[in-house]
């Protein structure tokens, strides 16, 4: 009885050890041929299968805008983002900023902002484009009595490449008035 137990332990130990070299491979082939399997015979059926390279997803997906260029919209002033980090107090051909802030709602209603839809991943925001539109948006937000802005959709800036440092030149400078610097 002790001999039977020793033989069973030896067989269990032998089966748990990884097979080494040709001896192990021969034992596997013999085992698979006994069982009627094809484990050891895969090398006999070499069919030429053309290698297909996996299709890479396009990095730049052309997004269809929900609005067409030139379309006129009426948007909440609080939802509009600044497209430039600074705003001139005085600009040639435009009213000074202190005077613009005191405009009546009718005067603001006569102004149109140039806006573009900017996407950051799946999140999209309206960003004003150009110095004139940034100045008008600043005056609207500073006035705090203007709920809606008349806007026209324009083409946005070209899409950024991933190697561009987005901290140096972001597409939007946010909707917060306090983050915009006034310059003379």
Image (cartoon, grey):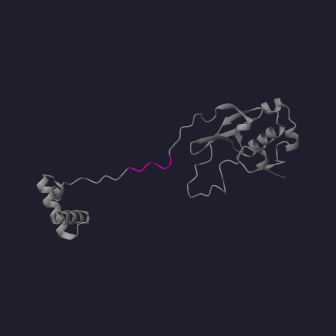
Q: Which one is in front, 41 or 45?
A: 41
Above or below for 102 versus 168? above
Position of the N terminus by quadrant: bottom left
Above or below for 43 versus 131? below
Residue 108 picture location, percent across and down:
80, 33
Residue 55 picture location, percent across and down:
38, 49
Residue 152 picture location, percent across and down:
68, 35
Q: Is residue 183 left or right of residue 122?
A: right
The quadrant holding residue 141 is top right
Q: Give the range drawn in magenta.
A: 55-60
Q: Which one is in front, 146 or 129?
A: 146
Q: Give the number of marks.
A: 0
Above or below for 159 versus 65? below
Q: Is residue 96 visible?
A: no
Above or below for 117 versus 110? below
Q: Which one is in front, 100 or 163?
A: 163
Q: Can residue 127 be seen in this view?
A: yes
Q: Residue, x 13% and y 53% (percent of image)? A: 35
What secondary structure prevails in the magenta region? loop
Q: Residue, x 88% and y 43% (percent of image)? A: 98
- For this orientation, the residue located farthest to the top is 106
Residue 62 picture location, percent across and down:
51, 43
- For this orientation, the residue located farthest to the front is 1
Q: Residue, x 64% and y 40% (percent of image)? A: 125
Q: Is residue 132 magenta?
A: no
């Amino acid at each position: 009885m002790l001999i039977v137990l020793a033989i069973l332990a030896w067989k269990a130990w032998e089966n748990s050890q990884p097979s080494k070299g040709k001896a192990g491979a021969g034992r596997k082939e013999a085992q698979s041929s006994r069982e009627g399997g094809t484990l050891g015979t895969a090398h006999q059926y070499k069919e030429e299968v053309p290698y297909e390279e996996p299709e890479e997803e396009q990095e730049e997906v052309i997004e269809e805008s929900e609005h067409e260029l030139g379309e006129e919209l009426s948007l909440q002033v609080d939802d509009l983002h600044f497209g430039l980090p600074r705003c001139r107090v005085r600009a040639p051909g435009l009213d000074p900023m202190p005077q613009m802030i005191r405009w009546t709602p009718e005067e603001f209603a006569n102004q149109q902002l140039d806006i573009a839809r900017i996407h950051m991943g799946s999140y999209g925001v309206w960003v004003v484009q150009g110095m004139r539109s940034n100045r008008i948006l600043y005056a609207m937000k500073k006035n705090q009595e203007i709920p809606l802005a008349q806007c026209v959709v324009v083409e946005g800036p070209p899409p950024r490449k991933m190697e561009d440092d987005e901290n140096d030149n972001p597409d939007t400078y946010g909707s917060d008035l306090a983050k915009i610097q006034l310059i003379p």
